[in-house]
Image: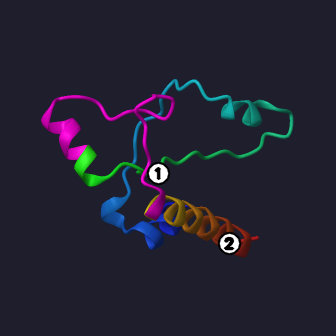
């Protein structure tokens, strides 16, 4: 998946983060008797200006469930759709 994502966003824009104890129920799919393989990726959605402002003020960027979260629709939607589609097509080719 990493190679697929690198082909979409470039290696310099792909960051691996440590697992977290997030509140998503996504992991429930992986503990079923079917043992569905899982992967979650985060997509950068904030404008470079908002990121720079938060960093300058020493504030964290707003998270997904924050009332201050305001993704930039373009290129966020295009990049996310392209990334998910590329990963899926690459995985299907391997089967």
What residue lies at 47% left-to-right and 51% top-to-bottom? 43
User: Does residue 3 show up magenta in the picture?
Assistant: no
Nearer the camera: disc 2 or disc 1: 1
Q: What is the count of numbered marks? A: 2
Residue at which label 2 appears:
89
- Chief SS of the magenta region: loop
Q: Residues within 10 Å of mark 2 (few under 14, many from 20)?
A: few
**Which image quadrant for residue 10?**
bottom left
User: Does residue 65 show up magenta in the picture?
Assistant: yes
Q: Name the image quarter holding the C terminus.
A: bottom right
Q: Position of residue 92 (x, y in %)?
A: 73, 70
- Please say if 14 is above or below 46: below
Query: Mark 1 falls on what kind of element?
Result: loop
Q: Position of residue 41 (x, y in %)?
A: 52, 48
What residue lies at 67% left-to-right and 35% top-to-bottom? 26
Q: Residue furthest right?
A: 33
Q: Position of residue 63 (x, y in %)?
A: 43, 33
- Please say if 94 is above or below 74: below
Magenta segment: 51-74
**C-alpha distance separating marks 2 and 1:** 19 Å
Is residue 15 found left or right of 31 in the rendered image? left
Q: Name the image quarter holding the N terminus.
A: bottom right
Is residue 28 found left or right of 66 in the rendered image? right
Residue at which label 1 appears:
43
């Amino acid at each position: 998946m990493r190679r697929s994502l690198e082909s979409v966003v470039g290696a310099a824009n792909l960051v691996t983060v440590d697992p977290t104890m997030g509140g998503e129920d996504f992991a429930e799919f992986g503990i079923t008797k079917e043992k569905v393989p899982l992967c979650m990726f985060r997509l950068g959605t904030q404008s470079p200006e908002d990121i720079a402002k938060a960093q300058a003020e020493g504030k964290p960027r707003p998270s997904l469930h924050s009332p201050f979260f305001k993704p930039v629709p373009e290129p966020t939607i295009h990049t996310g759709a392209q990334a998910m589609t590329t990963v899926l097509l690459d995985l299907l080719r391997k089967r």
